[in-house]
Every structure is written in C-alpha cells, then in structure tokens.
Image (cartoon, coloured by chain):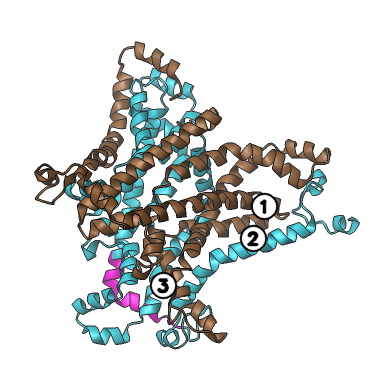
Chain colours: A brown, B cyan
Amino acid sequence: MAGDRKKAKVKKRRWRRDDTELTLLALPTTIWYFLFSFLPMFGIIIAFKEFKINGGFLKSFFSSKWVGFNNFKFLFSSKDIWLIIRNTLGYNIVFIILGIVIPVAAAIAIGQIHSKRMAKVYQTAMFMPYFLSWVVVTALVWAFLSYDKGLLNNLLESMGYERQQWYMKKGMWPPFLVFMNLWKGVGYGMVVYLATITGIDKTYYEAAGIDGATIWQQIRYITLPLMKNVIIMMFIMKVGGIFYSDFGLFYQVPRDSNSLYNVVYTLDVYVYKQLRTSTTGMSAAAAFVQSVAGCITILTANAIVRKIDRESAMI
Amino acid sequence: MAAEIKNKKKNEPDGFDRFNRVSKTVNVILNFIFVLAALACVIPVLLVVAISFSAEESILEYGYHFIPKIPSLEGYVFLVSQGKMIVRALGVSLFVTIVGTALGVLLTTLMGYVLSRPDYKLNGFLTMVVFIPMVFNGGLVSTYFIVSQFLGLKDSMWALILPLSVSSFNVIVCRTFFKTTVPESLVESAKMDGASQLMIFGRIVLPISLPVLATIGLFLSFAYWNDWYQSMLYIDDSKLLSLQALLNQILTNIQMLVKNAATIGITAAEMLAKMPQESARMAIVVLIVLPIACAYPFFQKYFISGLTVGAVKG
C-alpha cells in the first residue's frame, strides 16, 4: 500500500496515549469486522467437512468429520454446476460490457442536452429504480407479465393475440434479465460518470471549439480520455465480482420459476437453494469456489491494471 | 441561425457555449431518447399505484390497467383492517432502519476517523482489516452458519441490523472525507489543549463533517429499508417480518394473508372470498416505495457526493 516511507518513520516512535485512545475508538468496529467478516472467512473450511448441525456451531464444527475434497467431487460431477457457472459468467460478461458502455454514453449524451433543467429531471427519474428493492421490482414486473391480469397480456389480447405464460418462456428471460439489470443500474452509473464529466475543466472544450473541433471530436479526444481512470476503476470492481450475481435479480424477478432454472440459475441462487434444502456440503463447496475464484479474479484484474497504469490500480 | 438567437430562452447559456454544443436536431433526438428512458423508469411505479387504487372486481374482470376501471380504496382499507400485521411490519422496518443507521454511522465514522490519523501506530494493521474483506469474503454458507449458529442471531432483530452495519466502502468514503476536509492543525491544537481523541472526534470532527454523516446515513437507511435478504435468511418468526419481507412472503404465497386472518377469527374461506388480494398487495408496495420516492430527490446530492468520494482512492 502507499506510504511505505511514512510507515517506516512511524515504526520508530514509541506507543503514546494518543495511540491507546485511537485504538479504543476503533475497537467496536474492529470487533465487528472480526465477527462478521473474518470469522466467516475461517468458517469457509466447512467446505472440507461433512457439516452436520449438532447443537451449537462449534460443537457441530468439531463433531463433523473431515472429508477432504469429497464435496467438490460431488459438486463438479453434477452437470448442473457447469451450467450455473456458464450462466453466472455469461450474464456478468454482458452486464459488464453494457453496464459500462450504456451509462458512459448516457452520461455524455445527457451532458449535451441544451436545457440543464430537463437533464436534471431525466437524471432524477432514471436514478429512481436504483432505490427500489428487488422484491418491489418483482411486484412491478408481475404487474406487466402476470398471465391472467398482466398489462402485456391484456395488450396482446386486445390486439387479437394469445395470452402467454411469460414465466415459463425460457427464450425471453436472458434478454429480459439484461434489460432489468440495465433498468435498475443505468441511472446509478450515469450519476457516477456524470460527476467525472462535470469535474472536467471547461476551458479544454472552449479551446477545442475555437480550434474547430466538432462536439464528436471533443468527446473522443477530451471527455473519454479524462474518464479513463473512473471507467477502469468501475471495470475492475465489476470484473472482481464476476463470480457473484445479484441474487434478487435471478431469484426474485423470475419468481423462482422451475421451468426457467437452466436460464436463470447462477452461483448465488444455487448456493442459496442448496443451503435451504440442507445439502450443506454441496453449497459450502460452491460458496468456497465462488469466494476463492472471486478473490483470484479481483487480484488478477487489479494486477493487470497496475501493469498498464499504476495510477488506476485499486491496491 | 439569426432566428435561433432571437428566440433564446432565459435559462440558456450566453456566448461561446451557445455555439459549442450539439445542433438543434441532435438535441431533439437526445431529448426524445431520454424522455423514453425516464418514462420507462417511472411508469412501472405508476402502474402499481394505479392497481393499488383499483377495485378487486375490476382487476379480476379487466386485469391491471393504468387507469383504474373502478377506482376504490379497498386495498388500503384491507391493510388498515389487518392493522396488527401491517403496523408490526412497519414497526420492524422503522426500528431496523433507525437503529441500524445510527449504529452503522457510529461504527463507520469511528473507523474512518481512526484511519484518517496519519501518525497512528496501528494504521497499517487496521487498513488491512478494512481492505481484506473487499477482496475476499467467507461466502453465504459460512456467513449463514456463523451468524445464525455461532452468534445465535437466528430469529432476532439483530440479524437484520448487525450484518449490514459496516461496509468497507463506507469506511473508505469516511476516511477520505476526514483526510481531505478536517484540517490537521485543528486536531493538533485540540490535542495541545489536552483534549482526548474521543472529545476531538465527538466535539470537533463530527460537527464539521455533517455532509459525510448525511451521505453514510442515507446509504445505510436505504439499505436497511430495502433489505429483504437478511429476513429471508435469518427470520422464520412472522412477528419479525419487515415490510419488504412481508411483501416477499405475500408475493410467493398469497395464502399468508389468509393464514394471518384466520388467527384473528374469521374463517379462511370467508376471508379469501372477500379479500382484495391484488390491490392490497400493490398497496404494500406503495407503502414501501412512497417514503423512498418522496425522500430521494431531495437527498440525491448527498448520494452523489458519496459515490464520487468513494471513487477517489485515498
């Protein structure tokens, strides 16, 4: 981390009263981190056990027997897991690409609108879905897609078409989930990128304009290069989460429909469902794979960025 | 071009900016696209509001519509008649949001402040404590067992509060804020006057850091108000359901309302016949969304400042 020189200097001096006081101030939060973040990190080794609930956690932990990699063998011999990993990575790759391209384009475009007041109105409206929970979104989606009352089916019927069982139609769900992800996230992304754009010195654009640069050229040679760091930061963060998925989007919005499972199941949904059906071994193994793979991807993404451009790296 | 200048509106910029911008046609196209996008974001909420004000028979007859065929308040009347359940869920939601936000802001700012002290001896160690969870975590299964079994929080209100109270992202937002806006000389002079760090934090740093408190507070209160996942994991007792969790249960299982009514004394079959299921369900959605929709346009700027501080590494 930054400031190695500073650290060396700090090490030399003695412990002061100030340090005691600051340690006491940090103590509650440190305890929180220990209980809610670090204990689960060690708890991850239950993936190597045949974990059975037997009284309290510690008792069950010590009484469960070690099974080595058996849980993983079972996990990877089921063909489901490959489908689930494919879904998780597939959706995430699409989300990462569109989740950067569209908000960046939207932020640049909204900055071009002549009326600043209208731009603010659009931004406020588009930011709103970000504040709704997936449970609420599920209810909203249901109002459109429900078989007997949904708006979409009403519309189809009034135009003389058949009503459709939308919650059973596999084909429409991947594009629809991509749409819902964008619907909820574009406003947020736009706000982040817009903040960067408004931070750019106006005189750059004036100078370019006087030299005869078109708006398009100004975007290409001023705005985008100056947004590079933020875009890379967001990219690393998203790539680091490539093994994670938004549980609410994949579990709630399709209403856990059985006929959709091979297009909507992702690692998070799988781990949750396995945990609920109390096949702890499989879910612990899947969660382990998710944590370790996630950690490796985030460190790798960061290392690559560090090589290209030290300034943009997170760590 | 001349006509364009003559028609200039009051709120439009003068001078060079007027020429260095997209043409009128492009402006119209952009406006059109953004109107569509904005409507797409708002319309689903309006539809749900309309459904909540529809009479049950009109929904059964005609389905969902933007303009209620037979307007009615029966969904809301039903919620009020189910008083106990809704009030309790609202109470849980409010309690979790208020206590969680207060606790979370305290824990987050304390850590943020300590990490912002440049000559603190354990700075390196605590920075690692905050950074490691951003890269690695124990995953759902292990977290679930630790929280529910080891810490014994199953079916406890604290299971809804504690796991969400600290996030490393918020801690770093705080640290960056304190580092950049609290002058070092202020802390030093207070120290020379013999103030303890607790006093410096409580009496000097917090009062001049209201923007970051507002930002973190908003992040947290929205997270708590919108949370249903913790309830799904840790809460089986229907008395501890928050509004979100209640809606979640109703969406998955409409019998839930009937079951609840049965305990009050009316037979389930009778209830089911009378119950405005559709509008009542959407009325709960309105109950959840209303405070958010009213509050967020005013608090947007604190959100935005938080998001952008977080993007700057300290």
Cα–Cα gap, marks 1 and 2: 9 Å
Query: Does B212 sit left or right of A280 as displayed?
Result: right
Q: Where is mark 2, residue-wise?
A: B34
Q: Which residue is mark 3?
A: A167
Q: Nearer the viewer, residue A73 or A240?
A: A73
* Residue on which disc 1 sits: A109
Span colored in magenta:
B72-88
Confirm whether residue B207 shows in the render: no
Image: A3 above or below A211: above
Tell whether position B87 is magenta.
yes
In the rendering, at what x and y percent does residue A313 appear? 50, 32
* Residue A315 visible within the image: yes
Secondary structure under badge 1?
Answer: helix
The mark that comes first in sequence, 3 or 1, is 1
Amino acid type, label 1:
Ala
Question: Residue at (22%, 43%) from the top-left corner?
Answer: A69
From the top left corner, tell me how far across and down residue A49 is, in percent: 17, 45
Q: Residue furthest top?
A: A12
Q: Amino acid at mark 3?
A: Tyr
Q: Quadrant of the image for the C terminus of chain A?
A: top left
Asked if the residues shown at circle 1 and circle 2 are in contact, with their CB atoms under 8 angstroms apart, the answer is: yes
